Amino acid sequence: MVTHSPEEIKAFVIETLRVSGANFRQVDDDLLIAEVTVEIPPMFFAPARLEKQTLNLVFRAEASASYPGAELVIPGSFRLNWFIDGLKERGNFTLQSFKDERTPAEAEAALGELCPQLQSLFPLPAPTVQTRPYLLAHYTLSFQTDELHEELVSLGLDMTNGAVTPDFLRFLTEAEAVPGVPATAVETPACSLEEAFSLLHRYLEQLVAAKDRRWIDDARTRYEEELACLYQYYQEDQRDWADFRLRALDLYDKFRPRVLVRLVNVGLLYLPELVYRLPAAGRKKKTVLRYLPLLAKVEGAGSSAS
């Protein structure tokens, strides 16, 4: 059984806090103070909410006596498992190749339904079978005020042209997947992984900007109501206005609308692509038709079916 030293566990916790963007301060060799955001589960008719908590952490049993109330973070402790679970939620990476089990005749029939104008050219020449790389990314969008609302977003990005397909995973629910890179030729990507994620993030920004603003307006209404009550309380009792300002700032931070985008998992997927080279007709030169059967998408030959 592998055991970890207190120094190794502390280093792991500090790295986890950094990855999570949490504020922390190492007081001395024993005590670590961290400010984290935790989700409070819904109760009765109250929705889930987020709450900031300050954690006082020590990593050696003998240090607990010097810091009463501090949590001891050791193998098997609640707090260490809490940090581990938090990292697991940040997701995994997978690489999969997908197959289309249809026969050439079945594929051609499906293509004819998508593009009826092609039926006059049937039977088509035998296609070249290759694959096209897609980046699949699942994101959690957390809309945060004093309440919490989360949405799971599934996006697929075509690595050859940068096009983003929403709800991408629904196209692949009945397809057979095998781990690894396919044996067939792979279409050359036009963008790097860094550029692909930039395109996905730009799409998410547009998605958030288009969301109904009622979640912001409702939070503002609740904030103004609580701020008015707080002001009246301090005005009537002639209390310390410096304390009022601090509590007013806490209220602002509590109700301030913000969106946290978290990458849940990501996959590099290779989808089958049938490439037909259509014969010349009249003055028209030979054209290339690209058919992605799993996405029911056709490119080329003047078609925009998708």
Image (cartoon, helix red, strand yellow):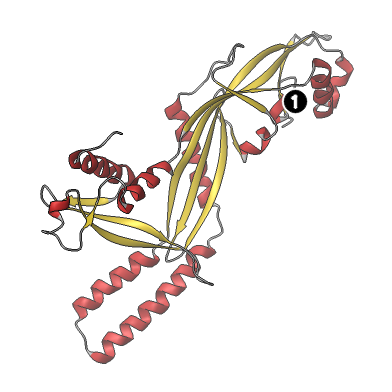
Front residue of 91 and 287: 91
Q: Quadrant of residue 153?
A: top right
When the figure is inspected, residue 134 is found, relative to residue 140, above or below; the finding is above
| Residue at 18% across, 40% down | 7
In front of the other: 90 or 270: 90
- Residue 11 point in image, percent of width and height: 22, 40
Q: Residue furthest bottom?
A: 236
- Residue at coordinates 75% horizontally, 25% vertically from top-left? 303
- In the rendered image, which residue does mark 1 sit on? 303
Q: Is residue 300 above or below residue 36?
A: above
Which residue occupies the extreme right position in the image? Answer: 120
Label 1 Cα crowd, 10 Å radius (few <14 / some 14-19 / many 20+): some
If the image is split into quadrants, where does the N terminus sit?
Answer: top left
State the residue at coordinates (74%, 30%). 305
Left or right: residue 193 compared with residue 135? left
Q: How many marks?
A: 1
Q: Secondary structure at mark 1?
A: loop
Query: Whole-percent x and y of residue 142?
Result: 47, 53
Check disc 1 and give the amino acid type. Ser
Query: Dividing the image into 4 quarters, which one contains the C terminus?
Result: top right
Residue 248 at what x, y percent from top left? 30, 73
Image-based side of 21 in relation to 105, left or right? left
| Residue 32 spot, x, y in % from top left | 18, 52
Please identify the quarter of the rendering in which residue 111 is found.
Answer: top right
Residue 254, relative to residue 85: is it above or below?
Answer: below
